[in-house]
Amino acid sequence: MRRPRAVRAAGAGKAGQAGEGPGAGRSRRRAAAALSRLPVDRFLLALAGTVGLAVLLPASGRAATVADGATTVAVGFLFFLYGTRLSAREALDGLRHWRLHVTVLVCTFLVFPALGLAARGLVPYVLSHPLYTGLLFLCLVPSTVQSSIAFTSIARGNVAAAICAGSFSSLLGVVLTPVLAGLLLGGSVGGFSADSLVRTALQLLAPFLAGQLLRRWVGGFVARHRRVLGYADRGSVLLVVYAAFSQGMNEGVWHQVTPARLAALAGVEAVLLAVMLRGTSFAARRLGFGREDRIAIVFAGSKKSLVAGLPMASVLFGAQASLAVLPLMLYHQMQLMVCAVLARRYAAQAPDGPGAPDAAAPDTPRAGDSGPAPGPSGSDPSGSDQAGAGPSGAEAAGRAAGAPAGP
């Protein structure tokens, strides 16, 4: 039985308002599903909220003094936890695969810094000096552990190698990152000097070594309470960020940043990520690594740790720390988005199956990025540079980094 003409017309009008037929609805559902699979770091959202709080209500006067003292304690606590979680024995057990680990370390502590130094030519035309300093600091930070493992697993790569490579990078980064910052940044930011290097060793290295020494007795407790301690160390990082951005607001450093500079920074970091993804893939092939090892090298050699970088920046840069960590935060979200796409592509190209399940978006991002400790509490807020990267920056890096035939 046909409906009256008026009813049919009303139905057609509603269908038009709803979205031009079932085809358009399916397209929207597919687009929504694709967006839902992009890894948006929930810890990064907490960082953004903390930054907003510092902008609206910066700590000043006596409150700033209390915040500085609490930050010093929080940083020491963070690196003590890293020391208790990182198993030096497990890292040493991976020495039999030394060629892979050396390749990742060369990418992290030689190639990245070289690219950062080459970007000096972008100042002042593309990047301001403070943003360039943050970009160079980003290039000195160690690799991640948790998200490198997650993406390597999704891509069906050598997960054991990714664990060991991330552990080596995190272990050496506690020492190498401050030393490289002293050599390459000098006294240009925050009065960095030999005295601040000693202070850095006391605030970062001493608690880390204490955690290593006490790991035999407290490691089990840390492992059993990893969820609670995971919230504690992420809370410590949020405190560090609040104190750093409050100090930056009080010093007026944010007046040096414009939307155009942020957009330029996002573009530069998209290029940096693309170069590292392509470079690690090419180098791994030329060095004769197998497919699974190449995947581990690509993900461990191209990523940077937010949770390790933020506390170090607060110690090294003082009032300038808020600008110094901005490139790191942006790069972190960009690397999560691009590497999630690449991991699924590599999984689909795996010889033994059609690809990884849709749950591919790694769980790691919920804790941030993966700090020096590979432990399950995984808090590597190392990712936080998202301000302004936007989809365009990630898509540009993804297209440039592409993976025609796997890593």
Image (tube, rainbow, N blue to C red):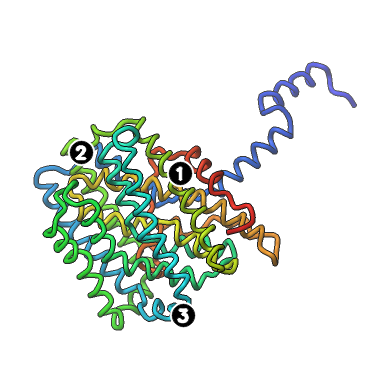
Label 2 secondary element: helix
Please, is residue 161 above or below residue 246 in the view?
Answer: below
Please, is residue 12 above or below residue 111 in the view?
Answer: above
Q: Position of residue 33 (x, y in %)?
A: 61, 45
Left or right? Give the position of 123 relative to 200: right
Task: Please name the amino acid that badge 1 sits on.
Answer: Val
Residues under labels 3 and 1: Cα distance? Answer: 34 Å
Q: Position of residue 112 (x, y in %)?
A: 38, 54
- According to the picture, the residue beneath numbered tag 2 turns out to be 249
Q: Residue at x 75, y 22 (%)?
A: 12
Q: Position of residue 138 (x, y in %)?
A: 33, 51
Q: Residue furthest left?
A: 62
The reply to whether dot 1 and dot 2 touch (C-beta < 8 Å) is: no
Label 1 secondary element: helix
Please report whichever mark, 3 or 1, sits nearer to the chain's N-terminal start.
Answer: 3
Mark number displayed over residue 271: 1
